[in-house]
Image: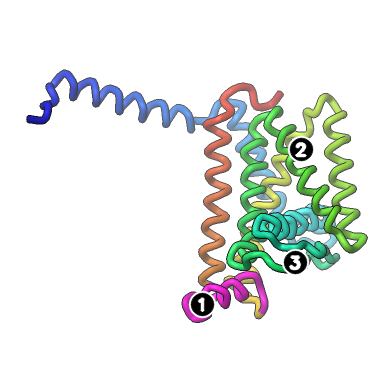
Amino acid sequence: MPPVATDSQYDHYLVARQNVADQAATGLTPTSDQRIILIIIGVYIAAILVLWNMPIAKIILAPFKLLTVGLHEFSHAAVGCCTCAKIDSIEIDPDEGGVTRMRGGIQACTLPAGYLGSSLIGAILVMCGFNILASKIASIFLGVCLLFTLWWAKNWLTRAIGVVFIGLMIFLWWLAHGAGLKYFVLFIGVMSSLYCLWDILDDLVFRKAYESDASKFAKVCGGGCMSSRAWGVIWFFISLMFLVVGILIGLAAFKGTCLS
């Protein structure tokens, strides 16, 4: 006969389960420092949304928008390399568009990589923005992404964006022992996540661009199986999930002092 749990064993199980639930709740409960970070994230989101389309003021965001376009194109190229593609070039244009030219690779992987990859990078940066050491590591990762983008760059604007932001991160590392680097990493993470979410809705769901990553992906995946708009909706929720999970991991992983 299988062993029968006694009342005492069942009580121990209930206590253990309650302890696990309490630890999970405590892990996601923000500390006072983390509340400040959450407020800063909220301020960043509000500022970005306000400045996004304001005449003249939107110029402030323009370099950061171009950086996120660069991360989008880098994600295409990185996944292309992982699927044995030959990367010919990456180009960013002043109208906040971009293109990655490659030969070979697996299109079913490289096509969604732009939106999903840049949103994942944004979520990682947001997560690391809860801790100064993690932010420094994230800035190295971001710098490597920009160096590869520079390697593949074929126009002056793409090169300029890479050089300017690599230089800015080096300066922030030097300034006040990198104290400002955390807020920069956090802002770039929020910007990349929001830009990706907005771009998916604007190009793939609301406006439904005639030729887009989603329309090409729909053809690769069987044409009439799902429309490009449907893929856009799926990518939107995946990108949103990345951002939410990034914040939750940041809350759970960095319970020490976040602001120093």
Count of numbered circles in the view: 3
| Mark 1 secondary-structure assignment | loop
Percent of width and height locating residue 169: 83, 38
Give the quadrant of the C terminus: top right
The magenta stretch spans which residues?
211-229
Quarter of the rendering containing residue 66: bottom right
Q: Is the residue 254 above or below the residue 248 in the image?
A: above
Residue underneath mark 2: 140
Residue underneath mark 3: 102
Give the quadrant of the N terminus: top left
Amino acid on which the number 2 mark rests in the picture: Ile
Q: CA distance from mark 1 to mark 2?
A: 39 Å
What residue lies at 42% left-to-right and 31% top-to-bottom? 25
Amino acid on which the number 1 mark rests in the picture: Gly
Residue underneath mark 1: 222
Mark 1 is surrounded, within 10 Å at the Cα level, by few (under 14), some (14 to 19) or many (20 or more) other residues, namely few
The answer to whether the residues at label 1 and label 3 have Cβ atoms under 8 Å apart is no
What residue lies at 57% left-to-right and 42% top-to-bottom? 246
